[in-house]
C-alpha cells in the first residue's frame, strides 16, 4: 500500500532546469540559483549567488560546488537490505516492512527503549520536528538525540542559563560593522562561514579592534589586531584574566549591571581573588596581551563577542561560554546597536534543528520534555495523552555507550555519520557493530551506512522543499528545484511511511512539507522558539523571518534583549567560572595537545564534499599541522606520513609543517574517516552541564608512520 504524497511533477526532459535554492552546508544558508542544462551530451551546471540579507550575494567555494555531490553518480537511488552480508536493492515496500517489523520486534522483546533515533542538523525543520514526533509517538522511545549535541549544546545551554533563551546571534549580522571591538573566540569564520567575513572587514575599516582567540594563526586570525594564542582548553581562565583587568581598570557598566543582571558580586569576588600572572601562565598568553585585549574590549563603546566550537567543544565548554557572557554583561554590551553575543551556529539547520524536539530533553518550540505543562501542550497538539509521552533520554555519545552495552539494540540514523563524528570513535565503531539492527537514511553510503542492515535513500537539498533556520535565527524557505533521483524519498516522507507500517498513520497524515510546518507552528506556539506567525506564504514574500514570531502580523525579532532578558524576572545571570581545565593534560608519554577542526573546502565528515570532484581535489587527504620545532623534535619532515596516538587510538595523517600553530599543539581536520579519522584519538570526556564531548583537547604523541609501524611490528613479534 502506498500513501499519497505530493511529488514534483515537472518534466525531466526539459532542457534547462532553473533551481532557486540555498547552500546545504553551513549556517549562513547563502541563497543561490543552480541552472542545470541537459541539452548537450552531458549535463552542465551554472551557479549564481542570489542576494539575500545574510550572504549579500556571496558564495564560498563549497556553495559554488555544492551541486556536484547532489548530482553525483554515487547517490543512493534505491532502498537496500543486507542479504548474505551484502547490501542488496529491494523495493520500498520490502524495506519499510522490514524496518517496521524489526523495530517493533526488538521493542516487543526488550521494551520500547531498546531502540534509539539519531538525527542531524542538516535536516529541514519539518524533518527534524517529525523525527522527534516519530520517536515519541510512533516508537514511544525516550532515546533520541542528534549530532547538534556535538555542535551547539555548550553555547545553547549557556545562553539558556545566562539569558533565558538560546538563539545563535542575539543581533542582526548588520550590527557587526557597528561594533568598535570584536572578539572572535575559537571561531574560524574565514573558513567556516566565509561569506560572513565582509561584515568583520567592514567593522575593521570602520576602526574596530579585532581580537582573535585561537591556538593557531587561523585564516580568521589574519584580520586580528590582537591574537591571543591560547593553550587548548584554557579559554575560561583566559577570560578570568581579562575580567580581572576590566575590573581593575574600572571598565564595567555599573548601571547596566544594576538594572539588568544578577549575580555580579559573586563573580567580582571570585575574579578579585585570582592572580593575573597565574592566568597568563596557565593559558600560555602573555600578560601584556591579556591586558591589551581586555582594555580594548572594556573601553570600546560598542562591542560583540562570538564563540564557536574552539571554545565550546570542551569538558568545561558551557562554563567557558558563560565566562565570555560574563564579560559581555559586565561591560553592558548587549541588546543595543553594535553590541551582542553570537554562538556561531555550525550546520545548515543547526539552529532550527535544536529547537523542535530532536534533543533528548526537548519538545518542539524549545519546550522541555520533563515540564508537565509543556508535555500537556504538545500531547494536545499531537492528539495523545501526556502520559503516553516518554521521558528524557540521554545525549548522543551516551546513546553510543548504551549501544555498546547492548541496552539499545536497534538504531535509526537520519542525517549523521556518527561513526566518524563521535569522540572515541574506536569504541563507537565497536558499538555500532554490536547492534542487532541498524538503519541509515542518507544520500550516500557513508562510513556508518556501510555497517547498516538497511539503507534508505533520501533526497538532497536540490530536491527537498522545507525550511531552514540560519545562524541569526532567521527562518528561510528552501524550495525544491528538481525531482528526486531514482527512488529517493524525503526524510519526512520516510517517517510518514514508517508510521503507516507501524500502525500510527493517523498521527502522520502529511502530504507535503508545508502541512508539517503548519503543525510545527502550532506545536511551537507560546514556546521560546515561537514560529506560530511564520507561514510558507509569508516566507515566500518576506525572504526570511526571525523567531520569535508569535502572530501572523508580527514582524519577527531581529535583535533580542533590548529591554529585558528572557528569564521570568527579565534579568541576565552572572556565573563565576573556575580557571582549571578538566581536560586531559599532556604527560610524559603523551606530551602534546591535539586539537582539531575544519578546512575551507570540506564539510564535517566529508561524506558530501569528498564526493564533489572540485572540492575533493583541493584537499585529497587529512593533514597534521605541526610547528617546525616540534616537527624537528619528533623527526618529522613536511609531507611525510605521521601517526598521532592517544591512549584511545591512532590517526594517520600527512605532516604539514607550519609556524602558525603553538609548539605544544597539533591540529588535525575532521573531514576523513577510517585510519584518517581524528576521532580515533579524541576522549569521551563529557561536559556535565550539556554533555558536549571534549573534542578539542587530547594528550597525544606523534612520530613518523614508518617508525610507528616498525614499533608495532616489534611489539607483535615480542608477543609471538
Ligand atoms: N569549511 C567548513 N565550514 C563549516 C563546517 C565544515 O565542516 N567545514 N562545519 C560547520 C559546522 S557544523 C560547524 S559546528 C562550524 C564550526 O566552526 P568553527 O568552530 O569555527 O570551526 P573549528 O575549525 O572546529 O574551530 C574553530 C577554531 O577553534 C580553534 N581552537 C581549537 N581549540 C581551541 C581552544 O581550546 N580554544 C580556542 N579559543 N580555540 C580553539 C581551532 O584552531 C579553529 O581555528 O563550521 C561550520 N562551517
Ligand atoms: N573531532 C571532532 N569531531 C567533531 C567535531 C569537531 O570539531 N572535531 N565537530 C562536531 C560537530 S560540530 C558536528 S555538527 C558533527 C557532525 O557530524 P555528522 O553528524 O557526522 O555530520 P555529517 O558529516 O554532515 O554527516 C551527515 C550525514 O548525513 C547525510 N545528509 C546530509 N543531508 C541530509 C539530509 O537532508 N537527510 C539525510 N537523511 N541525510 C543527510 C550526509 O550525506 C552525511 O552522511 O561532528 C562533530 N564531530
Ligand atoms: S558553505 Fe556556508 S558560506 Fe559557503 S556558500 Fe554554503 S552557506 Fe554560504
Ligand atoms: Mo557543527
Image: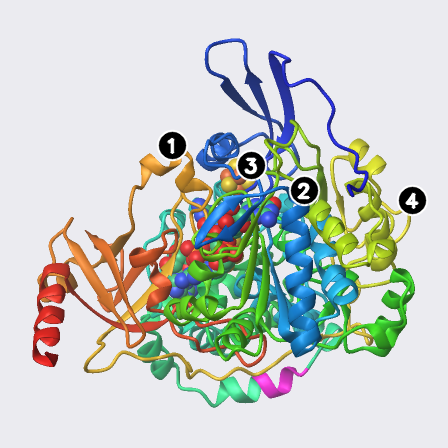
Classify mark 3: helix, strand or loop: loop
Image coloring type:
rainbow
Q: Which residue is mark 1?
A: 613
Q: Which mark is residue 77?
A: 3
Comparing 376 with 269, the one in front is: 376
When asked about the image quadrant of residue 1, the answer is: top right
x 83%, y 54%: residue: 505
Task: Give the class, few, some or many, for how many residues have Cα within 10 Å of label 4's Cα (few <14, many ≥20).
Answer: few
Say whether residue 266 is magenta: yes
Task: Give the class, few, some or many, for how many residues have Cα within 10 Å of label 3's Cα (few <14, many ≥20).
Answer: many
Comparing 349 with 543, the one in front is: 349
User: Closer to the observer: label 4 or label 2?
Assistant: 2
Query: In the drawing, does residue 515 fall left or right of residue 150?
Result: right
* Cα separation between marks 4 and 3: 43 Å
Prevailing SS of the magenta stretch: helix
Residue 163 place in picture, x, y as percent: 70, 69
Q: Which residue is mark 4?
A: 553
Residue 531 place in picture, x, y as percent: 81, 52
Tell me if label 4 and label 2 are in contact, CB under 8 Å: no
Query: In the drawing, does residue 375 fall left or right of residue 114?
Result: right
User: Closer to the observer: label 3 or label 2?
Assistant: 3
Up the image or down, 347 lies above or below 256; here it is: above
Residue 485 place in picture, x, y as percent: 59, 31
Comes first in the chain, label 4 or label 2: 2
Give the magenta range.
263-267
Comparing 690 with 99, the one in front is: 99
Say whether residue 184 is magenta: no
Tell me if label 4 and label 3 are in contact, CB under 8 Å: no
Amino acid at each position: 500500500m502506498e500513501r499519497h504524497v505530493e511529488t514534483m511533477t515537472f518534466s525531466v526532459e526539459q532542457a534547462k532546469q532553473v533551481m532557486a535554492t540555498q547552500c546545504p552546508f553551513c549556517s549562513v544558508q547563502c541563497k543561490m540559483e543552480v541552472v542545470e542544462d541537459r541539452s548537450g551530451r552531458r549535463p552542465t551546471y551554472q551557479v549564481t549567488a542570489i542576494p539575500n540579507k545574510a550572504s549579500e550575494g556571496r558564495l564560498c567555494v563549497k556553495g559554488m560546488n555544492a551541486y556536484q555531490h547532489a548530482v553525483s553518480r554515487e547517490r543512493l537511488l534505491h532502498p537496500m537490505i543486507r542479504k548474505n552480508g551484502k547490501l542488496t536493492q529491494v523495493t520500498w515496500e520490502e524495506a519499510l516492512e522490514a524496518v517496521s517489523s524489526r523495530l517493533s520486534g526488538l521493542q516487543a522483546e526488550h521494551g520500547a527503549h531498546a531502540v534509539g533515533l539519531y538525527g542531524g542538523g542538516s535536516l529541514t525543520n519539518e524533518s527534524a520536528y517529525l523525527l522527534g514526533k516519530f520517536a515519541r509517538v510512533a516508537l514511544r522511545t525516550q532515546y533520541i538525540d542528534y549530532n547538534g549535541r556535538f555542535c551547539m549544546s555548550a553555547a545553547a545551554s549557556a545562553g539558556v542559563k545566562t539569558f533565558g533563551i538560546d538563539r545563535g546571534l542575539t543581533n542582526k549580522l548588520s550590527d557587526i560593522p557597528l561594533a568598535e571591538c570584536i572578539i572572535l573566540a575559537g571561531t574560524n569564520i574565514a573558513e567556516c562561514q566565509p561569506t560572513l567575513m565582509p561584515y568583520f572587514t567592514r567593522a575593521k575599516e570602520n576602526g574596530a579592534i579585532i581580537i582573535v582567540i585561537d591556538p593557531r594563526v587561523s585564516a580568521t586570525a589574519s584580520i586580528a589586531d590582537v591574537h591571543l594564542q591560547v593553550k587548548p582548553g584554557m579559554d575560561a581562565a583566559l577570560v578570568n584574566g581579562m575580567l580581572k583587568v576590566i575590573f581593575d581598570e574600572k571598565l564595567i557598566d555599573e548601571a547596566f549591571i544594576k538594572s539588568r543582571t544578577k549575580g555580579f558580586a559573586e563573580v567580582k569576588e571570585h575574579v578579585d581573588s585570582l592572580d593575573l600572572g597565574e592566568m597568563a601562565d596557565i593559558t600560555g598568553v602573555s600578560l601584556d596581551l591579556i591586558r591589551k585585549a581586555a582594555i580594548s574590549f572594556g573601553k570600546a563603546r560598542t562591542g560583540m563577542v562570538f564563540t564557536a566550537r574552539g571554545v565550546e567543544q570542551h569538558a568545561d565548554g558551557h562554563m567557558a561560554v558563560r565566562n565570555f557572557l560574563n564579560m559581555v554583561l559586565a561591560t553592558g554590551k548587549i541588546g543595543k546597536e553594535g553590541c551582542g553575543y553570537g554562538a556561531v551556529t555550525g550546520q545548515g539547520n543547526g539552529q532550527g534543528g535544536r529547537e523542535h524536539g530532536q534533543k533528548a530533553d526537548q519538545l518542539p518550540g524549545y519546550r522541555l520534555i520533563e515540564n508537565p505543562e509543556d508535555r500537556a501542550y504538545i500531547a494536545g497538539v499531537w492528539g495523545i495523552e501526556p502520559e503516553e509521552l516518554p521521558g528524557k533520554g540521554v545525549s548522543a555519545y551516551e546513546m553510543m555507550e548504551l549501544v555498546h552495552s547492548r541496552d539499545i539494540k536497534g538504531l535509526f540514523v537520519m542525517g549523521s555519520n556518527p561513526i566518524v563524528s563521535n569522540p572515541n570513535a574506536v569504541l563507537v565503531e565497536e558499538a555500532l557493530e554490536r547492534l542487532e539492527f541498524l538503519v541509515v537514511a542518507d544520500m550516500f553510503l557513508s562510513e556508518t551506512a556501510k555497517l547498516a542492515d538497511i539503507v534508505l535513500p533520501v533526497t538532497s537539498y536540490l530536491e527537498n522543499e522545507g525550511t531552514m533556520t540560519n545562524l541569526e535565527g532567521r527562518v528561510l524557505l528552501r524550495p525544491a528545484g528538481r525531482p528526486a533521483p531514482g527512488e529517493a524519498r524525503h526524510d519526512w516522507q520516510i517517517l510518514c511511511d514508517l508510521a503507516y507500517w507501524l500502525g500510527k498513520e493517523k498521527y502522520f497524515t502529511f502530504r507535503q512539507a508545508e502541512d508539517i510546518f503548519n503543525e510545527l507552528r502550532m506545536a511551537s506556539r507560546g514556546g521560546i522558539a515561537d514560529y506560530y506567525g511564520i507561514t510558507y506564504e509569508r516566507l515566500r514574500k518576506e525572504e526570511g523571518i526571525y523567531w520569535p514570531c508569535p502572530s501572523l502580523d508580527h514582524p519577527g525579532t531581529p535583535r533580542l534583549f533590548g529591554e529585558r532578558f528572557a528569564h521570568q524576572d527579565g534579568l541576565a545571570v552572572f556565573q563565576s567560572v573556575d580557571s582549571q581545565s578538566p581536560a586531559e593534560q599532556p604527560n610524559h608519554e603523551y606530551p602534546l595537545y591535539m586539537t582539531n577542526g575544519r578546512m575551507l573546502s570540506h564539510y564535517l565528515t566529508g561524506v558530501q564534499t569528498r564526493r564533489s570532484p572540485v572540492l575533493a581535489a583541493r584537499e585529497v587527504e587529512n593533514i597534521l599541522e605541526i610547528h617546525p620545532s616540534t616537527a624537528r623534535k619528533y623527526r618529522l619532515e613536511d609531507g611525510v606520513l605521521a601517526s598521532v596516538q592517544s591512549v584511545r587510538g591512532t590517526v594517520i595523517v600527512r605532516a604539514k609543517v607550519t609556524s602558525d600553530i603553538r609548539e605544544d599543539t597539533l591540529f588535525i581536520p575532521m573531514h576523513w574517516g577510517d585510519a584518517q579519522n581524528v576521532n580515533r584519538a579524541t576522549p569521551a570526556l563529557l561536559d556535565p552541564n550539556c554533555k558536549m564531548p571534549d573534542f578539542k583537547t587530547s594528550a597525544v604523541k606523534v612520530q613518523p608512520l614508518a617508525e610507528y609501524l616498525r614499533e608495532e611490528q616489534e611489539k607483535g613479534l615480542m608477543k609471538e
